[in-house]
Image (cartoon, rainbow, N blue to C red):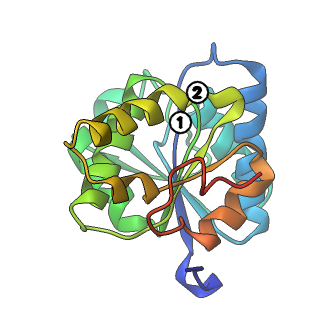
């Protein structure tokens, strides 16, 4: 079931904060920020100015979009808080993620490391517990997230996760497909590969 434009106003992006990320990932992050601004969607993100995180925020800001950064006080120096955008300073990672959840209507996941994985698992766990029904879109260049999807399927095969869980997100391979996928939402009961946009 698709979402109306009025129901999607803010999109949280989870992604890596490493400046050593592949140039094509950094470019995709900036393009996503620009696309969000063009679509009139506010970006909610981790507040830093580094890696894919900083690239997404700068792309949105430079394109005239609204941006809200949420950063814990102990990461202001490490993640180089992006002062040119609106940001909120919190005291813990838990507060940061709670604000992400409260301030967003949908989620996009770009390539990232252990911090991004931690955010993904909590978001999808809450979805599994019916605490939200917001759209979740993975940007999956070169099958970056394939091993994670395989692990999820492994838990389903072991009868530890219900099969319907595999329809909780959508997968796209191109940046330009991310926003349409947010509005379309995942197909009920579909696998990530079946619900992907190509």
Tell which tag, 2 or 1, sits nearer the viewer: 1
Out of 181 and 110, give the one closest to the viewer: 181
Query: In this rendering, would 129 be left or right of 48?
Result: left
Out of 133 and 60, give the one closest to the viewer: 133
| Helix, strand or loop under label 1 | loop
Q: Residue at x 42, y 52 (%)?
A: 166
Q: CA distance from mark 2 to mark 1?
A: 11 Å
State which tag comes first along the sequence, 2 or 1: 1
Number of marks: 2
Judge whether 40 appears above or below 189 on screen: below
| Helix, strand or loop under label 2 | loop
Query: In this rendering, would 125 be left or right of 37?
Result: left
Judge whether 39 appears above or below 62 on screen: below
> How far from the left and from the top, in percent, is residue 92?
22, 40
Judge whether 115 appears above or below 83 on screen: above
Residue 33, numbered circle: none
Q: Residue at x 47, y 69 (%)?
A: 188
Judge whether 14 appears above or below 75 on screen: below
Residue 18 visible to an observer of this rendering: yes
Q: Residue at x 64, y 37 (%)?
A: 140
Residue 15, numbered circle: 1
Q: Residue at x 70, y 43 (%)?
A: 58
> How far from the left and from the top, in percent, is residue 77?
42, 24
Residue 50, numbered circle: 2
> How far from the left and from the top, in percent, is residue 98?
27, 56
């Amino acid at each position: 079931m698709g979402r109306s434009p009025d129901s999607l106003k803010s999109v949280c992006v989870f992604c890596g904060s490493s400046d050593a990320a592949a140039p094509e990932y950094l470019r995709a992050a900036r393009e996503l920020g620009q696309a969000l601004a063009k679509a009139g969607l506010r970006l909610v993100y981790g507040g830093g100015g580094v890696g894919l995180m900083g690239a997404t925020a700068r792309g949105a800001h430079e394109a005239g979009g609204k941006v809200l950064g949420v950063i814990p006080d102990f990461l202001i120096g490490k993640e180089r808080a992006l002062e040119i955008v609106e940001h909120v300073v919190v005291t813990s990672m838990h507060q940061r993620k709670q604000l992400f959840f409260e301030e967003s209507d949908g989620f996009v996941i770009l390539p990232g490391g252990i911090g991004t994985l931690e955010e993904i698992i909590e978001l999808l766990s809450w979805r599994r517990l019916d605490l939200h029904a917001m759209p979740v879109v993975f940007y999956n260049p070169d099958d970056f997230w394939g091993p994670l999807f395989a692990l999820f399927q492994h838990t389903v095969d072991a009868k530890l996760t219900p099969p319907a869980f595999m329809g909780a997100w959508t997968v796209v391979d191109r940046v330009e497909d991310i926003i349409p996928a947010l509005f379309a939402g995942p197909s009920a009961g579909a696998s990530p590969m079946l619900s992907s946009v190509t």
